[in-house]
Image (tube, coloured by chain):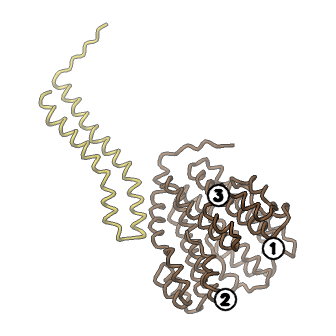
Amino acid sequence: MVVEVIIDGGMLYGLIAVGAGLATGLAGIGAGVGEQGIGAAVVGVVAEEPGFLGKGLFLMLLPETLIIFGLAVSLILMFAWAPFA
Amino acid sequence: MPVLRLPKFGNPVKYAYITGRVRAKKTKLIPNDMYQRMLSMDISEITRYLEETQYKDEIDEMAKDFSGVDLVEYATFANLAKTYRNLLEVSIDEPKFLILEYLRRWDVWNIKTILRGKFHGSSDEEIMKYLVPAGELDLEFLDGLAKKDTVEEVIQAFDGTDYYVALTQYDGHMLSSVENALDKLYYFRMERAVGGTLSVGGGLLLKYIRKEIDIKNVITLFRMNKAGIDASIIQENLIEGGKLGGDLSRMAGQSYDEFVRGLEGYPFWSAISDVATEGDGISRIEARLKAYLVRYAWAISNYHPLSILPVLGYIVSKDTEVSNIRKIVRGKEADLPAELIEEQVVVA
Protein backbone atom coordinates (compact mmCIF):
# COMPACT_ATOMS: atom_id res chain seq x y z
CA MET A 1 0.00 0.00 0.00
CA VAL A 2 1.40 3.33 -0.92
CA VAL A 3 0.64 6.25 1.28
CA GLU A 4 1.00 9.48 -0.54
CA VAL A 5 1.53 12.53 1.52
CA ILE A 6 1.04 15.77 -0.22
CA ILE A 7 2.51 18.73 1.52
CA ASP A 8 1.54 21.95 -0.08
CA GLY A 9 3.18 25.31 0.63
CA GLY A 10 0.72 26.25 3.41
CA MET A 11 1.22 22.96 5.31
CA LEU A 12 5.02 23.25 5.18
CA TYR A 13 4.86 26.84 6.35
CA GLY A 14 2.72 25.72 9.29
CA LEU A 15 5.17 22.96 10.27
CA ILE A 16 8.07 25.42 10.13
CA ALA A 17 6.12 27.78 12.41
CA VAL A 18 5.47 24.92 14.90
CA GLY A 19 9.19 24.03 14.82
CA ALA A 20 10.15 27.64 15.44
CA GLY A 21 7.75 27.80 18.37
CA LEU A 22 9.13 24.57 19.87
CA ALA A 23 12.74 25.81 19.49
CA THR A 24 12.08 28.92 21.57
CA GLY A 25 9.58 27.30 23.95
CA LEU A 26 11.68 24.25 24.88
CA ALA A 27 14.79 26.41 25.23
CA GLY A 28 12.78 28.61 27.62
CA ILE A 29 11.71 25.60 29.72
CA GLY A 30 15.33 24.35 29.83
CA ALA A 31 16.58 27.75 30.94
CA GLY A 32 13.87 27.87 33.61
CA VAL A 33 14.88 24.47 35.00
CA GLY A 34 18.49 25.64 35.11
CA GLU A 35 17.64 28.96 36.69
CA GLN A 36 15.50 27.61 39.53
CA GLY A 37 18.49 26.13 41.32
CA ILE A 38 20.79 29.04 40.59
CA GLY A 39 18.12 31.55 41.62
CA ALA A 40 17.48 29.78 44.94
CA ALA A 41 21.21 29.60 45.69
CA VAL A 42 21.76 33.25 44.76
CA VAL A 43 18.89 34.40 47.01
CA GLY A 44 20.41 32.31 49.81
CA VAL A 45 23.83 33.90 49.40
CA VAL A 46 22.44 37.43 49.01
CA ALA A 47 20.48 36.96 52.27
CA GLU A 48 23.85 36.56 54.01
CA GLU A 49 26.00 38.79 51.79
CA PRO A 50 23.99 41.61 50.12
CA GLY A 51 27.13 42.63 48.19
CA PHE A 52 26.87 39.43 46.13
CA LEU A 53 23.73 40.64 44.31
CA GLY A 54 25.48 41.86 41.13
CA LYS A 55 27.56 38.71 40.69
CA GLY A 56 24.56 36.58 41.60
CA LEU A 57 22.35 38.21 38.96
CA PHE A 58 25.04 37.62 36.35
CA LEU A 59 25.19 33.90 37.26
CA MET A 60 21.39 33.73 37.13
CA LEU A 61 21.39 35.13 33.60
CA LEU A 62 23.83 32.51 32.24
CA PRO A 63 21.11 29.92 31.41
CA GLU A 64 19.25 32.68 29.52
CA THR A 65 21.81 32.23 26.72
CA LEU A 66 20.02 28.95 25.93
CA ILE A 67 16.94 30.93 24.95
CA ILE A 68 19.03 33.06 22.60
CA PHE A 69 20.13 29.89 20.77
CA GLY A 70 16.50 28.74 20.57
CA LEU A 71 15.39 32.15 19.39
CA ALA A 72 18.14 32.23 16.74
CA VAL A 73 16.95 28.84 15.40
CA SER A 74 13.36 30.13 15.37
CA LEU A 75 14.31 33.28 13.48
CA ILE A 76 16.32 31.28 10.91
CA LEU A 77 13.32 28.98 10.41
CA MET A 78 10.81 31.82 10.11
CA PHE A 79 12.77 34.27 7.99
CA ALA A 80 15.34 32.19 6.09
CA TRP A 81 13.37 28.95 5.37
CA ALA A 82 9.71 29.91 5.53
CA PRO A 83 9.75 32.31 2.50
CA PHE A 84 10.80 29.35 0.29
CA ALA A 85 8.09 27.05 1.60
CA MET B 1 20.88 -4.58 53.98
CA PRO B 2 21.73 -1.97 51.34
CA VAL B 3 18.79 0.20 50.33
CA LEU B 4 18.32 1.50 46.82
CA ARG B 5 18.11 5.28 46.98
CA LEU B 6 16.64 6.88 43.92
CA PRO B 7 17.28 10.58 43.25
CA LYS B 8 14.09 12.63 43.29
CA PHE B 9 13.64 15.33 40.70
CA GLY B 10 13.41 18.72 42.38
CA ASN B 11 15.22 17.78 45.61
CA PRO B 12 18.52 19.47 44.66
CA VAL B 13 16.57 22.72 44.25
CA LYS B 14 15.30 22.46 47.85
CA TYR B 15 18.93 22.33 48.95
CA ALA B 16 20.10 25.19 46.69
CA TYR B 17 18.87 27.96 48.99
CA ILE B 18 20.18 26.50 52.26
CA THR B 19 23.52 25.45 50.78
CA GLY B 20 23.90 28.95 49.30
CA ARG B 21 23.34 30.40 52.74
CA VAL B 22 25.71 28.09 54.59
CA ARG B 23 28.47 28.63 52.03
CA ALA B 24 28.11 32.38 52.58
CA LYS B 25 28.04 31.82 56.35
CA LYS B 26 31.19 29.70 56.09
CA THR B 27 33.14 32.75 54.90
CA LYS B 28 32.28 34.48 58.21
CA LEU B 29 33.84 31.75 60.34
CA ILE B 30 37.04 32.61 62.19
CA PRO B 31 40.04 31.71 59.98
CA ASN B 32 42.37 29.00 61.26
CA ASP B 33 45.42 31.28 61.59
CA MET B 34 43.44 33.51 63.96
CA TYR B 35 43.48 30.84 66.70
CA GLN B 36 47.26 31.08 66.78
CA ARG B 37 47.00 34.86 67.21
CA MET B 38 44.31 34.49 69.88
CA LEU B 39 46.73 32.42 71.93
CA SER B 40 48.94 35.49 72.30
CA MET B 41 46.03 37.82 73.22
CA ASP B 42 44.60 38.38 76.66
CA ILE B 43 40.91 37.79 77.33
CA SER B 44 39.85 41.43 76.85
CA GLU B 45 41.63 41.49 73.47
CA ILE B 46 39.89 38.26 72.44
CA THR B 47 36.54 39.79 73.47
CA ARG B 48 37.26 42.91 71.41
CA TYR B 49 38.21 40.75 68.41
CA LEU B 50 35.00 38.71 68.76
CA GLU B 51 33.02 41.94 68.80
CA GLU B 52 34.23 42.54 65.26
CA THR B 53 32.88 39.16 64.15
CA GLN B 54 29.47 37.45 64.06
CA TYR B 55 29.45 37.33 67.90
CA LYS B 56 29.00 41.11 68.18
CA ASP B 57 25.27 41.11 68.98
CA GLU B 58 25.54 38.53 71.76
CA ILE B 59 28.62 40.16 73.33
CA ASP B 60 26.97 43.60 73.28
CA GLU B 61 23.79 42.16 74.78
CA MET B 62 25.50 40.20 77.55
CA ALA B 63 28.26 42.70 78.36
CA LYS B 64 26.04 44.40 80.95
CA ASP B 65 25.64 41.20 82.98
CA PHE B 66 28.91 39.37 82.46
CA SER B 67 32.58 40.03 81.83
CA GLY B 68 35.81 38.18 81.02
CA VAL B 69 35.68 34.46 80.32
CA ASP B 70 32.00 34.15 81.30
CA LEU B 71 31.02 36.81 78.77
CA VAL B 72 32.87 35.04 75.94
CA GLU B 73 31.55 31.65 76.92
CA TYR B 74 27.88 32.60 77.25
CA ALA B 75 27.96 34.84 74.17
CA THR B 76 29.44 32.08 72.00
CA PHE B 77 26.86 29.57 73.27
CA ALA B 78 24.03 32.03 72.60
CA ASN B 79 25.37 32.69 69.11
CA LEU B 80 25.67 28.96 68.44
CA ALA B 81 22.03 28.38 69.41
CA LYS B 82 20.90 31.38 67.32
CA THR B 83 22.86 30.19 64.27
CA TYR B 84 21.48 26.65 64.44
CA ARG B 85 17.91 27.85 65.00
CA ASN B 86 18.32 30.14 62.01
CA LEU B 87 19.32 27.17 59.85
CA LEU B 88 16.10 25.40 60.86
CA GLU B 89 14.01 28.51 60.19
CA VAL B 90 15.33 29.08 56.68
CA SER B 91 15.12 25.47 55.47
CA ILE B 92 12.11 23.47 54.28
CA ASP B 93 11.02 19.86 53.72
CA GLU B 94 13.81 17.30 53.65
CA PRO B 95 16.71 19.64 54.57
CA LYS B 96 14.76 20.90 57.60
CA PHE B 97 13.94 17.35 58.71
CA LEU B 98 17.55 16.21 58.38
CA ILE B 99 18.97 19.31 60.11
CA LEU B 100 16.58 18.85 63.03
CA GLU B 101 17.51 15.18 63.33
CA TYR B 102 21.18 16.14 63.48
CA LEU B 103 20.59 19.02 65.91
CA ARG B 104 18.84 16.71 68.38
CA ARG B 105 22.35 16.18 69.71
CA TRP B 106 21.89 19.53 71.44
CA ASP B 107 18.81 18.14 73.18
CA VAL B 108 21.08 15.38 74.49
CA TRP B 109 23.71 18.00 75.44
CA ASN B 110 21.09 20.05 77.31
CA ILE B 111 19.68 17.03 79.15
CA LYS B 112 23.21 15.99 80.18
CA THR B 113 24.01 19.55 81.31
CA ILE B 114 20.85 19.76 83.43
CA LEU B 115 21.48 16.31 84.96
CA ARG B 116 25.09 17.23 85.76
CA GLY B 117 23.98 20.56 87.21
CA LYS B 118 21.35 18.95 89.42
CA PHE B 119 23.78 16.17 90.40
CA HIS B 120 26.32 18.73 91.63
CA GLY B 121 23.69 21.03 93.16
CA SER B 122 24.16 23.99 90.78
CA SER B 123 21.56 26.75 90.70
CA ASP B 124 19.06 26.90 87.83
CA GLU B 125 20.54 30.25 86.65
CA GLU B 126 23.98 28.66 86.48
CA ILE B 127 22.66 25.66 84.51
CA MET B 128 20.73 27.86 82.05
CA LYS B 129 23.92 29.67 81.02
CA TYR B 130 25.37 26.46 79.58
CA LEU B 131 22.32 25.33 77.63
CA VAL B 132 22.20 25.53 73.85
CA PRO B 133 18.51 25.43 72.84
CA ALA B 134 19.22 24.45 69.23
CA GLY B 135 17.31 21.17 69.11
CA GLU B 136 13.68 20.21 69.58
CA LEU B 137 13.45 21.00 73.30
CA ASP B 138 12.75 24.72 73.57
CA LEU B 139 14.07 27.17 76.13
CA GLU B 140 10.80 27.21 78.11
CA PHE B 141 10.83 23.43 78.61
CA LEU B 142 14.54 23.45 79.50
CA ASP B 143 13.95 26.29 81.95
CA GLY B 144 11.26 24.17 83.63
CA LEU B 145 13.71 21.26 83.89
CA ALA B 146 16.47 23.46 85.32
CA LYS B 147 14.09 24.64 88.05
CA LYS B 148 13.45 21.09 89.27
CA ASP B 149 15.11 20.16 92.54
CA THR B 150 16.59 16.72 91.95
CA VAL B 151 17.98 14.49 89.18
CA GLU B 152 15.04 12.11 89.73
CA GLU B 153 12.50 14.89 89.08
CA VAL B 154 14.27 15.81 85.84
CA ILE B 155 14.21 12.16 84.74
CA GLN B 156 10.50 11.90 85.64
CA ALA B 157 9.72 14.87 83.36
CA PHE B 158 10.73 12.71 80.37
CA ASP B 159 8.26 9.93 81.22
CA GLY B 160 6.59 8.79 78.00
CA THR B 161 9.42 9.91 75.70
CA ASP B 162 12.25 7.95 74.06
CA TYR B 163 14.70 9.52 76.49
CA TYR B 164 13.02 7.97 79.52
CA VAL B 165 14.38 4.44 78.97
CA ALA B 166 17.95 5.78 78.74
CA LEU B 167 17.47 8.09 81.74
CA THR B 168 16.14 5.32 83.99
CA GLN B 169 19.62 3.75 83.92
CA TYR B 170 20.59 6.34 86.52
CA ASP B 171 21.64 4.45 89.64
CA GLY B 172 21.78 7.44 91.99
CA HIS B 173 25.58 7.54 92.11
CA MET B 174 27.04 7.98 88.63
CA LEU B 175 25.84 9.85 85.55
CA SER B 176 28.31 8.29 83.10
CA SER B 177 26.06 5.30 82.32
CA VAL B 178 23.11 7.64 81.63
CA GLU B 179 25.24 9.91 79.45
CA ASN B 180 26.50 6.94 77.47
CA ALA B 181 22.94 5.62 77.05
CA LEU B 182 21.76 9.06 75.83
CA ASP B 183 24.53 9.16 73.20
CA LYS B 184 23.61 5.68 72.00
CA LEU B 185 19.93 6.66 71.90
CA TYR B 186 20.70 9.72 69.78
CA TYR B 187 22.46 7.66 67.13
CA PHE B 188 19.85 4.90 67.28
CA ARG B 189 17.04 7.44 66.74
CA MET B 190 18.94 9.09 63.93
CA GLU B 191 19.37 5.75 62.13
CA ARG B 192 15.68 4.93 62.64
CA ALA B 193 14.33 8.31 61.53
CA VAL B 194 16.70 9.08 58.68
CA GLY B 195 17.20 5.49 57.48
CA GLY B 196 13.47 5.22 56.76
CA THR B 197 13.34 8.22 54.45
CA LEU B 198 14.91 6.35 51.51
CA SER B 199 16.15 9.69 50.23
CA VAL B 200 19.55 10.53 48.83
CA GLY B 201 19.95 13.27 51.45
CA GLY B 202 19.17 10.85 54.30
CA GLY B 203 21.71 8.37 52.91
CA LEU B 204 24.42 11.04 52.79
CA LEU B 205 23.65 12.15 56.35
CA LEU B 206 23.97 8.56 57.56
CA LYS B 207 27.26 8.20 55.67
CA TYR B 208 28.67 11.13 57.63
CA ILE B 209 27.13 9.93 60.91
CA ARG B 210 28.76 6.50 60.52
CA LYS B 211 32.11 8.22 60.10
CA GLU B 212 31.41 10.38 63.16
CA ILE B 213 30.57 7.30 65.25
CA ASP B 214 33.81 5.63 64.13
CA ILE B 215 35.86 8.68 65.09
CA LYS B 216 34.11 8.93 68.50
CA ASN B 217 34.79 5.23 69.09
CA VAL B 218 38.46 5.63 68.11
CA ILE B 219 38.78 8.50 70.61
CA THR B 220 37.13 6.33 73.30
CA LEU B 221 39.55 3.49 72.47
CA PHE B 222 42.56 5.84 72.66
CA ARG B 223 41.51 7.05 76.11
CA MET B 224 40.47 3.70 77.58
CA ASN B 225 43.19 1.53 76.03
CA LYS B 226 45.82 3.94 77.32
CA ALA B 227 44.25 3.77 80.78
CA GLY B 228 44.37 -0.04 80.57
CA ILE B 229 40.67 -0.57 81.11
CA ASP B 230 39.11 -4.01 80.68
CA ALA B 231 37.92 -4.88 77.13
CA SER B 232 34.32 -5.64 78.15
CA ILE B 233 33.93 -2.22 79.83
CA ILE B 234 35.39 -0.47 76.76
CA GLN B 235 33.04 -2.38 74.45
CA GLU B 236 30.07 -1.23 76.54
CA ASN B 237 31.13 2.37 75.93
CA LEU B 238 31.49 2.02 72.15
CA ILE B 239 28.62 3.41 70.09
CA GLU B 240 26.96 1.02 67.63
CA GLY B 241 26.28 1.94 64.02
CA GLY B 242 29.74 2.90 62.79
CA LYS B 243 31.23 1.49 59.60
CA LEU B 244 34.21 0.04 61.46
CA GLY B 245 32.16 -1.20 64.43
CA GLY B 246 33.45 -4.80 64.39
CA ASP B 247 37.11 -3.84 63.81
CA LEU B 248 37.13 -1.24 66.57
CA SER B 249 35.34 -3.53 69.01
CA ARG B 250 38.11 -6.11 68.56
CA MET B 251 40.71 -3.44 69.38
CA ALA B 252 39.20 -2.87 72.84
CA GLY B 253 41.52 -3.86 75.65
CA GLN B 254 44.65 -4.07 73.46
CA SER B 255 47.92 -2.60 74.66
CA TYR B 256 48.41 1.00 73.46
CA ASP B 257 51.18 0.12 70.97
CA GLU B 258 49.27 -2.81 69.53
CA PHE B 259 46.14 -0.66 69.21
CA VAL B 260 48.04 2.14 67.40
CA ARG B 261 49.64 -0.37 65.01
CA GLY B 262 46.17 -1.76 64.27
CA LEU B 263 44.93 1.67 63.20
CA GLU B 264 47.50 1.93 60.39
CA GLY B 265 45.83 1.78 57.00
CA TYR B 266 42.52 3.31 58.05
CA PRO B 267 41.54 6.56 56.25
CA PHE B 268 42.04 8.71 59.36
CA TRP B 269 45.50 7.28 60.06
CA SER B 270 47.32 9.99 58.06
CA ALA B 271 45.76 12.65 60.33
CA ILE B 272 47.21 11.13 63.51
CA SER B 273 50.20 9.04 62.37
CA ASP B 274 52.85 11.44 63.73
CA VAL B 275 51.23 12.15 67.12
CA ALA B 276 49.87 8.64 67.80
CA THR B 277 53.18 6.83 67.35
CA GLU B 278 55.04 9.35 69.47
CA GLY B 279 52.60 8.63 72.30
CA ASP B 280 51.66 12.31 72.67
CA GLY B 281 48.77 13.41 74.84
CA ILE B 282 45.34 12.06 73.94
CA SER B 283 44.01 15.62 73.64
CA ARG B 284 46.30 16.28 70.64
CA ILE B 285 45.16 13.05 68.95
CA GLU B 286 41.52 13.92 69.73
CA ALA B 287 41.92 17.40 68.20
CA ARG B 288 43.48 15.89 65.05
CA LEU B 289 40.66 13.34 64.70
CA LYS B 290 38.01 16.05 65.11
CA ALA B 291 39.77 18.19 62.50
CA TYR B 292 39.79 15.15 60.19
CA LEU B 293 36.02 14.83 60.66
CA VAL B 294 35.43 18.51 59.76
CA ARG B 295 37.61 18.15 56.66
CA TYR B 296 35.78 14.93 55.75
CA ALA B 297 32.39 16.67 55.94
CA TRP B 298 33.51 19.43 53.57
CA ALA B 299 35.38 16.99 51.29
CA ILE B 300 32.36 14.76 50.66
CA SER B 301 30.15 17.84 50.24
CA ASN B 302 32.20 18.61 47.11
CA TYR B 303 30.89 15.39 45.57
CA HIS B 304 27.31 16.32 46.51
CA PRO B 305 27.20 20.13 46.43
CA LEU B 306 23.39 20.35 46.53
CA SER B 307 22.77 18.09 49.50
CA ILE B 308 22.69 18.11 53.30
CA LEU B 309 26.48 17.71 53.43
CA PRO B 310 27.51 21.40 53.06
CA VAL B 311 25.00 22.22 55.83
CA LEU B 312 26.50 19.48 58.00
CA GLY B 313 29.97 20.79 57.22
CA TYR B 314 28.95 24.23 58.39
CA ILE B 315 27.23 22.93 61.54
CA VAL B 316 30.35 20.95 62.47
CA SER B 317 32.68 23.87 61.63
CA LYS B 318 30.63 26.29 63.72
CA ASP B 319 30.56 23.89 66.66
CA THR B 320 34.34 23.48 66.34
CA GLU B 321 34.83 27.25 66.26
CA VAL B 322 32.84 27.82 69.46
CA SER B 323 34.59 24.92 71.13
CA ASN B 324 38.01 26.34 70.13
CA ILE B 325 37.19 29.82 71.47
CA ARG B 326 36.04 28.31 74.77
CA LYS B 327 39.17 26.17 75.06
CA ILE B 328 41.39 29.20 74.47
CA VAL B 329 39.64 31.52 76.97
CA ARG B 330 39.24 28.82 79.63
CA GLY B 331 42.87 27.80 79.14
CA LYS B 332 43.99 31.41 79.52
CA GLU B 333 41.90 31.84 82.64
CA ALA B 334 43.56 28.77 84.15
CA ASP B 335 47.00 30.12 83.13
CA LEU B 336 47.76 27.05 81.04
CA PRO B 337 50.84 27.28 78.80
CA ALA B 338 50.04 28.32 75.21
CA GLU B 339 51.43 24.99 73.86
CA LEU B 340 48.99 23.02 76.00
CA ILE B 341 46.02 25.08 74.80
CA GLU B 342 47.22 24.93 71.20
CA GLU B 343 47.31 21.14 71.12
CA GLN B 344 43.62 21.03 72.07
CA VAL B 345 42.52 23.53 69.44
CA VAL B 346 40.95 21.84 66.42
CA VAL B 347 42.38 23.30 63.21
CA ALA B 348 40.66 21.78 60.19
| Label 1 to label 2: alpha-carbon separation | 26 Å
Tell me residue B286's x, y (percent). Answer: 66, 69
Amino acid carrying mark 3 in the image: Lys
Q: Is residue B159 visible?
A: no
Looking at the rendered image, the quarter that the N terminus of chain B falls into is top right
Q: Which residue is mark 2?
A: B334
**Is B20 positioned to the left or the right of B267 in the image?**
left
Crowd around label 2: few <14 · some 14–19 · many ≥20 (10 Å)? few
Please name the color used to draw chain A.
yellow
Which of the marked residues, 1 or 2, is nearer the chain's N terminus? 1
User: Where is residue B253, by image quadrant?
Assistant: bottom right
Which of the marked residues, 2 or 3, is nearer the chain's N terminus? 3
Crowd around label 3: few <14 · some 14–19 · many ≥20 (10 Å)? some
Q: Is residue B84 above or below residue B191?
A: below
Amino acid carrying mark 2 in the image: Ala
Secondary structure at badge 1 equals loop
Q: Are the residues at dot 1 and dot 2 in contact (C-beta closer than 8 Å)?
A: no
Residue pictured at 49% horizontal, 74% vertical: B31
Outermost residue, left direction? Answer: A83
Q: Which residue is mark 3?
A: B211
Amino acid carrying mark 1 in the image: Leu
Give residue B121's mark.
Answer: none
Which of the marked residues, 3 or 1, is nearer the chain's N terminus? 1
Which chain gets the brown colouring?
B
Compare residues A29 and B84 and report the one nearer the observer.
B84
